[in-house]
């Protein structure tokens, strides 16, 4: 059960806030072995590792389009309606993230602008080891489509029949994803990194996953592939006081605990009565939970921490940098002002974290393991690059040419200086050249 720590001194905070650690060495070895095999043996290696790690024999990792359609048809009406509703909200929120091009004339005749362009080929990883997270298809394929990515490659571990869950196929079809592959874990990430005969290589890999997937994405970076962020085992931090409903808190903690044994959930409070009330709810709910063994292990990794004040709560949140932060506290305004490190924030008693997991519209692919200090969650910009442009007119050359020549010569780069000197010299030869564009 969740341990209660009361009024810990600051010197103990970092020990208290440690996440469950994966064994880095054995992970690295496994990743290296799979990457080498996939680079050398392509689809054959992907199928071999799928047999080894997922216990499924496949002739080919790619799911034919006819199969995608057949499986998508199996999704019952009420689930389609729910996915359609989520799709619309996620589309709206990500569509609203489009920004107009930035245009500035830094000096007369010096025009600079910046435009976002899509990343042409992206890979999206959909977790499926312990549960087929079809909601992740929406979270990744919708912004990819809005950004205008040309090729989207989806990889997810197959079920025991060698198929993908019908809802993954339905969501993929709805979002216009055509390349759907039955490959999970390290082998999926390696295939999208190197490319195989059947699985295209991509420029950037997105998506959450277990420790193997997270480590494999880091390995992909060494091969020049970009990644969204380290999005590993799920976590939630609830900051609450006596205005919160203990049953809601217990359910919110369990909703992230049931993701995996290595998940972590925290309750921070300055109300001495709350931990006991939440613990009682947790005990009752855990007994009824289908995934109670997974959730119990995660709950054992977790803590309730009683602090002196909302000031300490804010400090501890910033130190931990949770993936998800739920605030049910009378000092909400103060906490929001103070908090700088969190992936996604859920406010008030009526906003469970599962709202953002599925259907409010925000993205659920978020930085874990403290990376919310420096990374954002997935958003529309994640699927684009910004290209900058500039054009100088005659006037522009006169305005900034001399400074450029001076700086280039001071750096000892005479060809840089020459490139501008030639333009300046040409201007002097045509002193009356019309400068329409400077008007
Ligand atoms: N941070 C986020 O935004 C976010 C979002 C959703 C889910 N998640 C997390 O994603 C994770 C999903 O994990 P999962 O396991 O259910 O699915 P997964 O798809 O990430 O991993 C399953 C794959 O792991 C590989 N694997 C399993 N055991 C292995 C071994 N011993 N050696 C090598 N490879 C092995 C297999 O290939 C299998 O297909 C959870 O931890 C969940 O918390 C995070
Ligand atoms: N909570 C996960 C992000 O950490 C996302 C998810 C998908 N399905 C349910 N939950
Ligand atoms: Zn979740």
Image (spheres, rainbow, N blue to C red):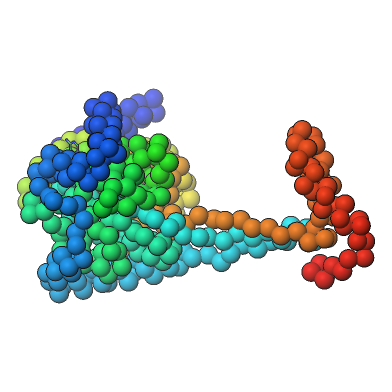
Image quarter where the N terminus lies is top left
Q: Which residue is depicted at the point 29% across and 64% down?
A: 177
Examine the rendering and report whether any part of residue 294 can be seen.
Answer: no
Above or below for 154 versus 292: below
Q: In this view, does 74 lie to the left or right of 82?
A: left
**Residue 22 point in image, percent of width and height:** 25, 31
**Residue 137 point in image, percent of width and height:** 27, 59
Above or below for 87 versus 19: below
Q: Which residue is depicted at the point 75% across and 59% down?
A: 392
Q: Nearer the viewer, residue 19 or 203?
A: 203
Image quarter where the C terminus lies is bottom right
Q: Nearer the viewer, residue 271 or 110?
A: 110
Q: In this view, does 377 lie to the left or right of 84?
A: right
Location of residue 349 (image quadrant):
bottom left
Q: In this view, does 120 lie to the left or right of 409?
A: left
**Residue 368 point in image, percent of width and height:** 34, 43
Q: How many labels does the image show?
A: 0
Q: Which residue is depicted at the point 50% across and 55% down?
A: 385
Q: Nearer the viewer, residue 14 or 199?
A: 199
Q: Is residue 306 left or right of residue 10?
A: left
Location of residue 23 (image quadrant):
top left
Q: Which residue is depicted at the point 39% across and 38% down?
A: 223
**Residue 143 point in image, percent of width and height:** 38, 62
Examine the rendering and report whether any part of residue 413 can be seen.
Answer: yes
């Amino acid at each position: 059960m969740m341990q209660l720590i009361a009024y810990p001194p600051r010197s103990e905070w970092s020990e208290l806030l440690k996440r469950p650690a994966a064994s880095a060495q054995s992970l690295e070895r496994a990743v290296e072995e799979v990457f080498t095999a996939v680079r050398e043996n392509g689809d054959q290696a992907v199928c071999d590792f799928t047999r080894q790690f997922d216990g499924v024999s496949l002739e080919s990792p790619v799911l034919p389009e006819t199969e995608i359609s057949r499986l998508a048809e199996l999704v019952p009406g009420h689930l389609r309606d729910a996915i359609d509703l989520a799709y619309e909200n996620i589309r709206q929120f990500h569509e609203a993230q489009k920004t107009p091009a930035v245009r500035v004339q830094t000096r007369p005749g010096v025009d600079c602008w910046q435009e976002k362009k899509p990343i042409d080929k992206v890979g999206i990883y959909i977790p499926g080891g312990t549960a087929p997270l079809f909601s992740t298809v929406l979270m990744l394929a919708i912004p990819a489509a809005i950004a205008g990515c040309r090729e989207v490659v989806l990889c997810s571990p197959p079920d025991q029949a060698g198929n993908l869950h019908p809802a993954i196929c339905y969501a993929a079809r709805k979002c216009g994803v055509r390349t759907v592959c039955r490959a999970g874990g390290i082998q999926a990430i390696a295939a999208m990194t190197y490319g195989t005969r059947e699985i295209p290589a991509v420029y950037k890999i997105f998506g959450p996953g277990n420790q193997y997937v997270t480590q494999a994405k880091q390995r992909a970076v060494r091969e020049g592939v970009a990644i969204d962020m380290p999005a590993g085992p799920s976590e939630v931090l609830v900051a609450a006081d006596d205005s919160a409903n203990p049953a809601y808190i217990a359910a919110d903690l369990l909703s992230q605990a049931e993701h995996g044994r290595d998940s972590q959930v925290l309750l921070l409070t300055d109300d001495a009565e709350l931990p006991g009330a939440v613990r009682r709810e947790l005990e009752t709910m855990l007994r009824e939970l289908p995934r109670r063994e997974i959730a119990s292990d995660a709950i054992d990794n977790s803590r309730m921490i009683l602090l002196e004040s909302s000031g300490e709560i804010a400090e501890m949140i910033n130190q931990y940098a949770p993936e998800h932060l739920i605030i049910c506290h009378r000092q909400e305004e103060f906490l929001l002002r103070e908090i700088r490190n969190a992936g996604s924030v859920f406010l008030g008693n009526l906003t469970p974290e599962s709202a953002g997991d599925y259907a409010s519209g925000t993205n659920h692919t978020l930085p874990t393991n403290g990376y919310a200090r420096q990374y954002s969650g997935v958003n529309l910009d994640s699927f684009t690059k910004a290209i900058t442009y500039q054009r100088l007119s005659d006037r522009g050359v006169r305005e900034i040419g001399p400074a450029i020549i001076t700086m280039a010569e001071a750096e000892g780069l005479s060809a840089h200086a020459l490139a501008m000197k030639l333009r300046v010299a040409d201007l002097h030869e045509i002193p009356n050249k019309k400068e329409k564009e400077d008007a």
